[in-house]
Amino acid sequence: MCYNLLIDAYGQKYLYKKAEETYVDLLQARCIPTEDTYALLIKAYCACGLLEKAEAAFVDMRKYGLPPSAIVYNAYIDGLMKAGNPQRAIDIFLRMKNDGCQPSTDTYTLLINLHGKACQSYMALKLFNEMRSKKCRPDICTYTALVNAFAREGLCEKAEEIFEQMQEDKLEPDVYTYNALMEAYSRAGFPSGGAEIFSLMRHMGCEPDRASYNIMVDAYGRAGLHEGKMLEPNYIDVLY
């Protein structure tokens, strides 16, 4: 456990050589590396852009009788996404499925985020439907990622449809989900729709954050309403 903590700490500081040395120390101490060890090591390599080393660590874990699990695949996919290599992340996702490793909720959420950021909401929705067909239950992060995917393209009706589906699944939206839905209306050029979501959020006891107010200011700005509504006290009181 201490070795894993050190590898994680070094990885977060981009000190891959230190992380690597800690891994060697672990082996020399005759400790058995776990899936978490490899997940952290792979993330450390990806963070430093060392994709060949990440792949080598991925392959190396099989030597210790550890077939890559969803935890390791997720770390690999997440690391590649943060390293700015989305296509490689997709390739690892496909390898995961080909290897017979069942993607988890976190896996699908990562891929939905990936496609959402690429303005490929149709692919994000396809993955969402795939996970549900495999009885993999989406969580609040999954739904928020999908709402965000539609929001980036200004598809407010689709975003609201997913928002309502989330509530039908007995999941309570948080500030990030509300913000994503407001962003959808903002990008679609309907500030009044965003204002309704803003009011709903407060009515439901979810406190807006700074991003919430920024989204509303941008929404009115996009619609050419630089004065008036966005200057009402309810929209700016959090800024002071």
Image: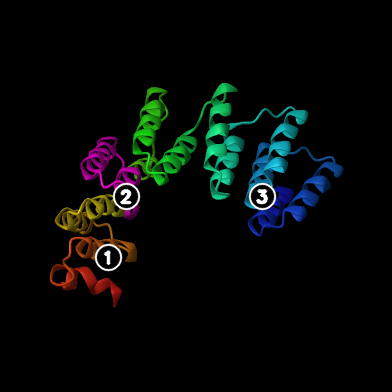
Q: For this view, does 214 lie left or right of residue 25?
A: left
Q: Which residue lies furthest to the right in this view?
A: 28
On the image, the x and y values in percent for residue 81 come to 53, 45
Please tell me how crowded label 2 is: few (under 14), some (14-19), or many (20+) other residues with Cα within 10 Å.
Answer: many
Q: What element carries label 1?
A: helix
Mark 3–mark 1 Cα distance, whole angstroms, equals 36 Å
Q: Which residue is drawn at 59% across and 46% down?
A: 79
- The residue carrying mark 3 is 44
- The residue carrying mark 2 is 177
* Three-letter amino acid code of the residue under disc 2: Thr
Residue 157, above or below 225? above
Q: What element carries label 2?
A: helix
On the image, the x and y values in percent for residue 232 come to 15, 72
Span shown in magenta: 147-176
Q: What element carries label 3?
A: helix
- The residue carrying mark 1 is 213
| N-terminal label among 3 and 1 | 3
Q: For this view, does 24 lie left or right of residue 135?
A: right
* Three-letter amino acid code of the residue under disc 3: Ala
Please tell me how crowded label 3 is: few (under 14), some (14-19), or many (20+) other residues with Cα within 10 Å.
Answer: many
